[in-house]
Image (cartoon, rainbow, N blue to C red):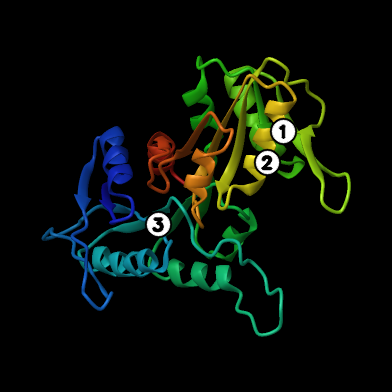
Amino acid sequence: MIIVGGSSSRDLAAETASILGCKYIEAATVRFPDGECYTRIEEESLDDDVAIIQNTYPDENLVEMFLLQDAVKRAGAKTVTIVVPYFGYARQDRVFKNGEPESAKVMCKLLAMGCDRVVTIDLHKEAVLEFFDRPYKDLKAANAMGDYFKGKGIDMVFSPDIGAAGRAKMVGERMGIPYDHLEKKRLSGTEVVIQPAKSDVKGKSVLIVDDMISTGGTIRTATTQLKAAGAKSVTVACTHGVYVNDALKKMDESDIDELLSCNTLISKTSKISVAGMIAEALKEKW
């Protein structure tokens, strides 16, 4: 197998290739002054199975993925697997108002035209994968998170709500510690309390895990209220650190003791690697 790293995921692609012990090619991608993308695979021939690791967010990276798919096929790739660490448009999985596109379905159909298999990581809405007419896998980062935090003094794992309780369960079981979810209770038109569903956090170091953090408002509020309930420390970890509207700055200034994310998107918090799980998926026959 040959791993091709797009411009959004070069380090992750190189690490994955190193784990697999296979050839790594960094796509020679540049963007012209008018914003258009140019990319090239600097190899005479790719007479092997090829995996492209590249985000489809923001839009410029999506265009690069389309171009890389064509480039590796023209270079003779036997099969093409696309690994999309963070999949753009996954949240628009249905038409909510008349006149809207079914964005996730459109992207899946376009991406499927240039590949044989699809690997994603912690899709916000996993049902999106059903739009692919190719074999697919959505990998769960919970084990990578659990392994990262083992032995780091965490006493309990929480999800932000009951809908994500499965993630807290997976991380907690991986670490061998208790897990729970947070509940939001509205006391009045302006007052909301976020608290553990069952657990007592007094004197405990807690970890909140989520699939993505965008604005981070709920997480900041939850942290403040957990501290008020007696939590010794609050660490937050997510798979995808999207961080819009100065979210990182606001979280730095909040009561959060440590903020970490996986290296699906690159920022100063991207310290949890998903390369191992990608490598395992690429080795499997499916």
Query: Measuring 24% from the left and 52% from the top, which residue is drawn there?
Result: 48
Residue 235, percent from left and from top: 56, 29
User: From mark 3 to mark 1, how far is it between C-alphas?
Assistant: 35 Å
Q: Is residue 201 left or right of residue 268?
A: right
Q: Residues within 10 Å of mark 1 (few under 14, many from 20)?
A: some
Q: Residues within 10 Å of mark 3 (few under 14, many from 20)?
A: many
Q: Is 250 placed above or below 19 here?
A: below
Q: Is residue 65 visible?
A: yes
Residue type, numbered disc 3: Asn
User: From mark 1 to mark 2, how far is it between C-alphas?
Assistant: 6 Å
Q: Residues within 10 Å of mark 2 (few under 14, many from 20)?
A: some
Residue 37, percent from left and from top: 26, 71
User: From mark 3 to mark 2, how far is it between C-alphas?
Assistant: 30 Å
Q: Is residue 273 visible?
A: no
Label drawn at residue 221: 2
Q: Is residue 52 left or right of residue 95?
A: left
The answer to whether the residue labelled 1 contacts the one labelled 2, judged by CB atoms less than 8 Å apart, is yes
Of 80 and 231, the residue lying toward us? 231
Residue 270, percent from left and from top: 41, 39
Per the image, the residue denoted by label 1 is 225
Of circles 3 and 2, which is in front? 2
Q: Is 20 placed above or below 212 here?
A: above
Per the image, the residue denoted by label 3 is 55
Residue 101 in which image quadrant: bottom right
The answer to whether the residue labelled 3 contacts the one labelled 2, judged by CB atoms less than 8 Å apart, is no
